[in-house]
Amino acid sequence: MKIYTKIILDKNNNIIEEEYFNYKGPISYAGIHYDFKSTRGAKAMEKQAKREKKLAERRAKKQAKALEKGVDLNKKQEDQTIPLNETITLAHLTDPENNKK
C-alpha cells in the first residue's frame, strides 16, 4: 500500500510530484486519526455561524412583522430627556401632557 507524504497537483488535478513509501502492516496504524481536540476549532466556527444565521433570521422576521404593523424598528426614538438648564418640577413628573413629549 502506498502511503503518500507529499502530493503536488496542477489546476487540472494532474500529479506533478509525489512522495510516498510502501507500507505493509495493519491498516489501523496507517493514516490520520482525528480526535475531539483536532476538530474543536472547526466545530466552534460551525456553531457560531449557525447561531449568527438563526439570529439574522429572527431579526428579519421581526423586521417583517413590524413593517406589517407600520412601525419602523430602525427609526430612532426622539429624545425625551429634560434639558440640563431646566429645573425638574412636580409638573414634569405628573402632568400627562408633559410625559407625551
Image (spheres, rainbow, N blue to C red):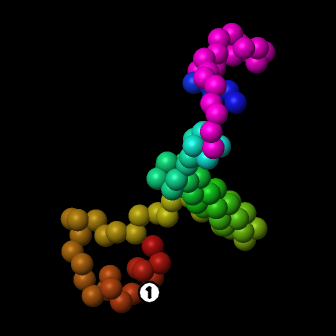
Q: Is residue 29 above or below residue 71?
A: above
**Circle 1 crowding by C-alpha within 10 Å: few under 14, some 14–19, many from 20:** few
Residue drawn at (33%, 85%) of the image: 93
Which quarter shows the C terminus? bottom left
- Report x, y in % for residue 71: 66, 66
Examine the structure image and report whether residue 81 is included in the region drawn in magenta.
no
Q: Which residues are magenta?
A: 6-26
- Report x, y in % for residue 4: 62, 25
Q: Is residue 63 above or below residue 41?
A: below
In the image, is 58 to the left or to the right of 77? right
Which quarter shows the N terminus? top right
Amino acid beneath label 1: Pro
Q: Is residue 14 above or below residue 97?
A: above
Residue drawn at (60%, 23%) of the image: 21
Q: Which residue is mark 1?
A: 96
In the image, is 82 to the left or to the right of 4? left
- Report x, y in % for residue 77: 49, 64
Q: Foreground: 68 or 64?
A: 64
Q: Secondary structure at mark 1?
A: helix
Q: Is residue 70 visible?
A: no
The quadrant holding residue 27 is: top right
The quadrant holding residue 64 is: bottom right
Residue drawn at (41%, 64%) of the image: 79
Q: Is residue 58 visible?
A: yes
Q: Foreground: 50 or 90?
A: 50
Examine the structure image and report whether residue 12 is included in the region drawn in magenta.
yes
The quadrant holding residue 84 is: bottom left
Residue drawn at (46%, 53%) of the image: 37
Q: Foreground: 27 or 87?
A: 27
> Residue placed farthest to the front in the image?
24
